[in-house]
Image (spheres, rainbow, N blue to C red):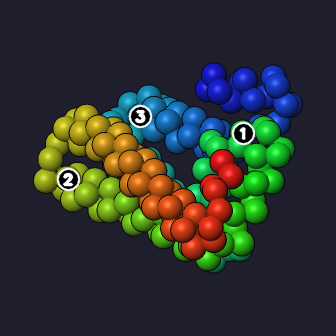
């Protein structure tokens, strides 16, 4: 939330990824509080995991997948020259393949989380699932971040070797 506020104050632009994250966190809490039933938080979590999985999967059918934009925001921020350099990396086949494979992996993990949560909801109490689910989400996200960093390092090495150049960022 603080980063969203910072981006707004500096550039008068909204950070779409940040807004989606805040919406994801807030919706489960609001659903649970309004309904007075923790079961609605579980349903909301499942819907959000499905939405994120579909967003990543669906973006594979566009020119550039969602992870390209997420990483660009992290790497370049509001710096126009860094954004231009990042966009220029798209010309390398290894970079494009890496962006698409990372995006597909994020989609698969979100769908796996969904399936695990539904399975746990069938065999465990709602309170246990609601306690376990956020922990599972944090672990999955951390694992995805580590995976993404490793894949990006591998792509960087491959591009530097194949193209005989220094990675610009």
Q: Please give left or right for residue 118 compared with residue 24 in the image.
A: left
Residue beneath label 3, please?
Answer: 32
Front: mark 1 or 3: 1
Q: List x then y, in percent, for residue 133.
A: 29, 42
> Residue at horizontal 25%, vertical 57%?
116
Q: CA distance from mark 1 to mark 2?
A: 38 Å
Front: mark 3 or 2: 2
Q: Please give left or right for residue 48 compared with residue 124 in the image.
A: right
Q: Can residue 124 be seen here?
A: yes
Q: CA distance from mark 3 to mark 2?
A: 18 Å
> Residue at horizontal 62%, vertical 67%?
164
Q: CA distance from mark 1 to mark 3?
A: 34 Å
> Residue at horizontal 33%, vertical 56%?
113
Q: How busy is the neighbourhood of tag 2: few (under 14 within 10 Å), some, or many (20 plus)?
A: some
Q: List x then y, in percent, for residue 14.
A: 77, 37
* Above or below: residue 97 compared with residue 84: below
Instruction: Please report contact status of discs 3 and 2: CB closer than 8 Å, yes or no.
Output: no
Residue lying furthest left: 123
Q: Earlier in the sequence, mark 3 or mark 2?
A: 3
Residue beneath label 1, please?
Answer: 77
Q: Can residue 144 be seen here?
A: no
> Residue at horizontal 58%, vertical 63%?
160
Q: How busy is the neighbourhood of tag 3: few (under 14 within 10 Å), some, or many (20 plus)?
A: some
Residue beneath label 2, please?
Answer: 120
Front: mark 1 or 2: 1
Q: How busy is the neighbourhood of tag 1: few (under 14 within 10 Å), some, or many (20 plus)?
A: few
Q: Please give left or right for residue 125 compared with residue 81 in the image.
A: left
């Amino acid at each position: 939330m603080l980063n969203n506020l910072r981006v707004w104050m500096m550039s008068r632009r909204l950070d779409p990824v940040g807004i989606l994250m805040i919406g994801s966190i807030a919706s489960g809490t609001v659903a649970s509080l309004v309904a007075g039933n923790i079961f609605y938080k579980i349903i909301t979590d499942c819907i959000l995991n499905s939405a994120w999985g579909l967003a990543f999967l669906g973006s594979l059918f566009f020119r550039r997948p969602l992870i390209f934009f997420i990483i660009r925001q992290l790497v370049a921020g509001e710096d126009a020259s860094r954004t231009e350099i990042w966009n220029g990396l798209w010309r390398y086949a290894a970079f494009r393949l890496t962006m698409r494979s990372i995006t597909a992996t994020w989609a698969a993990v979100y769908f796996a989380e969904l399936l695990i949560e539904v399975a746990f909801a069938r065999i465990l109490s709602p309170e246990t699932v609601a306690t376990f689910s956020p922990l599972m989400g944090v672990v999955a996200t951390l694992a995805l971040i580590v995976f993404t960093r490793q894949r990006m390092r591998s792509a960087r090495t491959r591009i530097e070797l194949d193209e005989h150049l220094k990675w610009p960022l």
